[in-house]
Image: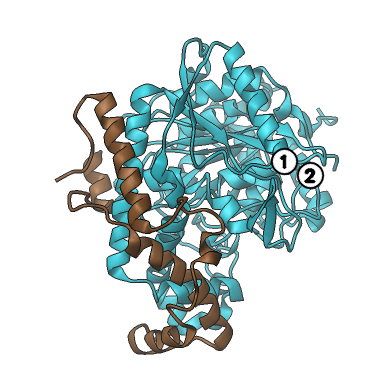
Amino acid sequence: MSAKLKTGNENQDVERSEMSRRKFIKAAGIGALAGPLLIRGAGADDIAPNTLKDVGKQFADVTLDEEEAIGASKALDPLTKILRGIDIGEEVEPVTIFSRRREK
Amino acid sequence: MKNLDLTKQTVASLSRLIKSKEISPVEVTEASLERIAKLDGTLKAFVTVTESQAIQAAKDAEKSIMAGKYVGPYHGIPIGLKDLYYTKGIPTTASSKVLADFIPSYDATVVAKLKAAGVVILGKTNTHEFAYGYISSPTVNAWDTQRIPGGSSGGSGCAIAASMCLAATGTDTGGSIRVPSAMNGVVGLKPTFGRVSKYGVIVLAWSIDHAGPMTKTVEDAALMMNIIAGYDPKDPSSANVPVLDYARALKGGIANMRLGIPKDNFLEPLDPEVSAAFQKAVEVLKKLGARMEEVSLPNAGLAGKIGFYMVCSEASAYHERWFKTKADLYTPAVRRYLKWGNLTGAALYIKAQRIRTLISNDFDLAFKKVDAIITPTLPITAPKVGEDEVSVGTTKMPLSDACRRNMYPLTLTGLPAMSVPCGFSHANLPIGLQIIGRPFDEPRVIRIAHNYEKSTDWHLRRPAL
């Protein structure tokens, strides 16, 4: 089922959008959405560099040196947290190349 | 016309002279090649210059025109092609050692269309390696060689601003047409997803990549769109939607057009000079009769983050075959990104795609209220080479975040977005205005941009080179 808001009632749509936004913020546990300091403040230790080294080696055939593992941790840990923290609701379908073709 | 000042010409103005046989494509091409010879040692906008082929193509164009076979406004016009576009018999390297020896056996659809329209290809313009970044080294900014040109289509932006070519092609995944357009003071259009074929264009991220024109003026962009837009069965993401005459969109005003200004995410923070230029642009548009309305795009603030996550994932999938055997040939930064992409999770990638749906819904709602949306293209002007962190007003942020913020919402949603020059900083650096339209509503975007451009003279300024 498409999550597009098709009620035809603009005010209601806006309200729903605002509710969705608040739900987002609350679920993500962040005060402001995706601010520039978010990545740095999100705590890069949870997905530790050594963990990424192991995961890379075992699951992705990728070898990370120390510097690359630290960089990966700093980049991917906050992104992962943001994505995990958001509760979208079951009705929202993903955009894919194929769904984009259907839209046309 | 041996004294032709190429720096003052546009495709539209030159095409009139070529059509009337007052000037030869050979003269124009020679003037461009002379300018490349003079400037490109410093600017480094081209990775390949196809001098002999260009002269031959110009002679062929001249012959056709003299025989009465003029085919249109780009006939005999010298252009550059971003080095991601396949060009038959001409190296296509994506500015990477990985593809240093690659010479395609066919043209990208866009290249084939441009050739059929009679263009003269001067060469291939530099891109950030595989379009994976905003620096585009070693190309420098045409306005200040100590600064970056933006990217990834930095070579195209620089080459146009420096009048080494009249127009060029770009690609845009996280802003790679609009960022260098804004930083170099030229016009760039990221069309609707599916509007311009990507067949034969090297991939960064399948579901987010776009191809489009970069030019000196809105009119020149419209004229190029008339050539390159359209359905291409060879491109699985191409849209089978009727193509309009984009040049017709240049006619008519924008009185009573409703323009949205986002109340969240796009305007905070901004460099004060960018903010001032944007406010002045708003006033110009109001004087032209446009009505401003605030719109809410609450989820757009996530676009930079999830866009990067998706690009990481898709790019690593695309590069898998080369990465296994040629990892050492990538630059360290791109090699690092490609490793990160192998560590992203499939479930989270899908979740990012679902958030993408929500961002699209925001725009759907906004476009019930307004006809188009305007924002500053970037929150900053071009930073100095080597600056990884930039000041945006009082906020410091990574350069990549500053470049992504106002860009990814439009590539993730596939909406058409154009950057036009809207001012200069005190350091004489260009500032861009972004105009965003509904899907396939490029004509309205072009009309707004053209009306704004006619009312200002920012697009007439050229760097002192």
**x, y percentage for residue B218?**
58, 28
Q: Residue at (51%, 26%) from the top-left corner?
A: B446
Question: Measured along the vertical axis of the image, is residue B148 above or below residue B76?
Answer: below
State which chain is coloured brown: A
Q: Amino acid at mark 1?
A: Ala
Quadrant of the image containing the N terminus of chain B: top right
Q: Specify few, some or many for label 1: CA neighbours under 10 Å numbering under 14, 14-19, or 20 or more.
A: many
Disc 2 element:
loop
Disc 1 element:
helix
Q: Which mark is residue A2?
A: none
Residue in the foreground of this view, choosing between B21 and B244: B244
Residue at mark 2 shares a chain with residue at mark 1: yes
Q: Colour of chain B?
A: cyan
Q: CA distance from mark 2 to mark 1?
A: 8 Å
Q: How many marks?
A: 2
Based on the displayed image, in which of its 4 quarters is residue B421 positioned? top right
**x, y percentage for residue B15?**
63, 26
Q: Amino acid at mark 2?
A: Trp
Residue in the foreground of this view, choosing between B416 and B246: B416
* Residue underneath mark 1: B161
Based on the displayed image, in which of its 4 quarters is residue B348 positioned? bottom left
For mark 1, name the chain.
B
Q: Nearer the viewer, mark 2 or mark 1?
A: 2
For mark 2, name the chain.
B
Circles 2 and 1 in contact, beta carbons < 8 Å: yes
Coloured how?
A: by chain
Residue in the foreground of this view, choosing between B107 and A79: A79
**x, y percentage for residue B29?**
71, 40
**x, y percentage for residue B106?**
44, 57
Q: Residue at (52%, 63%) from the top-left corner?
A: A39
Q: Residue at (27%, 67%) from the top-left corner?
A: B347
